[in-house]
Amino acid sequence: MPLKLSLKPGERFVLNGAVVQNGDRRGTLILQNKASVLREKDIMQEEDVTSPARRIYFPVMMMYLDEAGAERYYDEFARRLGEFMSVVRNPDALTDCVNASKQVMAREYYKALMTCRKLIDYEDGVLGNVASSVSAGRAEG
């Protein structure tokens, strides 16, 4: 089944390891066969790996972009996932961790990335609440 990408002007994406940028108009790209495609918004740079959930996402992203060399990133993924699971108590987040692990084991890296994105959203929500509480405490004091 073909994959249809609708691209914004100037939008960048990675296609089988090559960075591609759309021109100055909206465009559509139709991929007729299996390819590794990652939109700019889903690409994480190494310097952006600043939290536990992002440390899980990054090696999965690398496995997806470099499927032939995926085993190079697996140990990092497994270690970071284990660390995350050892401190998280939220049942939905733990279920997402298990699902991400199963998806990686099945080499369904894109699905695993989307599952890891849920972990980042969960983490941002928890840290956002903590940050708001700290700010509120300082404002009161």
Image (cartoon, rainbow, N blue to C red):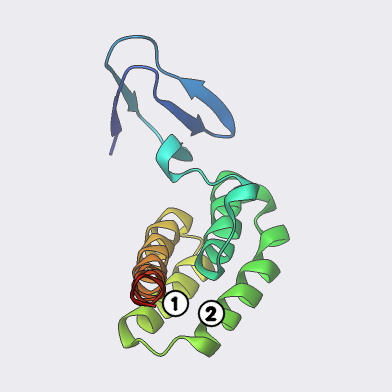
User: Which of the pair 62/140 is nearer the observer?
Assistant: 140
**Label at residue 26:** none
Instruction: Identify the residue shown where x is 58% and y is 50%.
Output: 48
Q: Please name whichever residue, 137 or 73, is drawn nearer the observer in this view of the structure.
A: 137
- Calculate the distance from the C-alpha at mark 1 to the C-alpha at mark 2: 8 Å
Q: Which residue corresponds to the image point at 43% horizontal and 80% vertical from the top-left? A: 98
* Residues at marks 1 and 2 touching, judged by CB atoms closer than 8 Å: yes
Figure disc tally? 2
- 42 is higher (above) or lower (below) than 121: above
Q: Which of labels 1 and 2 is toward the front?
A: 2
Q: Residue 66: x and y, percent?
A: 62, 46
Tell me the quarter of the picture where residue 80 sits. bottom right
Circle 2 SS class: helix
Q: Write the residue at 35% across / 9% down.
A: 24
The image shows residue 13 at horizontal and vertical percentages of 46, 31
Up/down of 88 relative to 130, above or below: below
Q: In which image quadrant can residue 29 be found?
A: top left
Answer yes or no: is residue 13 visible.
yes
10 Å crowding of disc 1: few (<14), some (14-19), many (20+)? many
Taking 97 as reference, is 59 above or below it? Answer: above
Q: Amino acid at mark 1?
A: Cys
Of label 1 and label 2, which has the lower sequence position?
Answer: 2
Side of 91 where 39 appears, left or right: right
Residue found 55% across the figure and 65% down from its top: 51
Residue linked to disc 2: 84
Identify which amino acid the numbered label 2 is placed on: Phe
User: What numbered label is drawn on residue 97?
Assistant: 1
Asked if residue 39 can be seen in this view, the reply is no
Residue 28 percent across, percent down from the top left:
28, 20
Q: Residues within 10 Å of mark 2 (few under 14, many from 20)?
A: some
Mark 1 secondary-structure assignment: helix
Q: Which image quadrant for residue 42?
A: top left
